[in-house]
Amino acid sequence: MRSDMELWKVHRRLRDLALGPFTEEGHRWHTLRSVLNKRMLKPAEAVLYTGAVNEVVTDFLDTLDNVRKESPSGVMVNDIASIFYRFAFEGISYILFETRIGCLEKNIPLETKKFIDSIGNMLKYSVFVSILPPWTNDILPYYKLYIEYWDNIFAFGEYVYITCMYVCTYVC
């Protein structure tokens, strides 16, 4: 049984966006998953991503080493969860968009930083939105902020996609 993703559907319905593989249900979900499974989960297909994954893992290890060296003790890695999230975002974006977004750089690009922060804030505000009654949406700031962070997440996806298409058109 799949998790109830009703809270994530709120933004998509409000902005008239497709639900996609995370939020779709029933036959449409099964169709989307079948297509993704063929392209990503079979060993013969997954092996195509090893170069990208190895590149991101290498940068991740370099990032950990640099953070460790910059710590007061020279051996401690503080806020490892944040580094793991950045590693995951970098790996996923490289596979999905075939481009790096700079999550593991010492100075993270502003658009990427906004994206990372928006995901964290969307998750934070989803707690408030899920427990407060709908009549509070126009009174309290939580719903508005929740939608705003979702807008930032989708805007970043569009930005990366358009950038990739532009580069491919003029470089390829």
Image: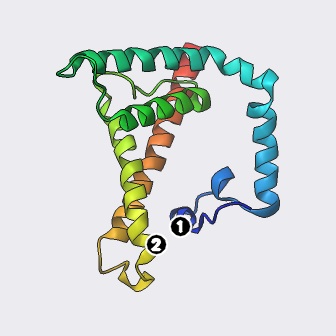
Residue drawn at (53%, 67%) of the image = 7
Most distant residue in the left direction: 72
Q: Position of residue 97 (x, y in %)?
A: 57, 30
Q: Tell me which amino acid carries mark 1.
A: Leu
The quarter of the displayed image where residue 136 is located: bottom left
Instruction: Choose between 95 and 53: the one closer to the eye.
Output: 53
Q: Tell me which amino acid carries mark 2.
A: Ser
Numbered marks: total:
2
Q: Position of residue 34 (x, y in %)?
A: 82, 44
Q: Is residue 98 left or right of residue 113?
A: right
Q: Is residue 31 left or right of residue 148?
A: right
Residue drawn at (69%, 59%) of the image = 24
Most distant residue in the bottom direction: 135
Q: Which residue is mark 1?
A: 7
Gap between marks 1 and 2, in whole Å?
Answer: 7 Å
Q: Is residue 92 above or below residue 9?
A: above
Q: Is residue 92 above or below residue 48?
A: below
Q: Position of residue 17 (x, y in %)?
A: 59, 58
Rendered image: mark on residue 30: none
Indicate the secondary structure of the residue bearing disc 1.
helix
Q: Which residue is mark 2?
A: 130
Residue drawn at (17%, 22%) of the image = 72
The quarter of the displayed image where residue 85 is located: top left
Comes first in the chain, label 1 or label 2 = 1
Q: Could you tell me if the residues under marks 1 and 2 are in contact, i.e. CB atoms within 8 Å? A: yes
For the C terminus, the quadrant is: top right
Indicate the secondary structure of the residue bearing disc 2.
helix
Residue drawn at (78%, 58%) of the image = 28
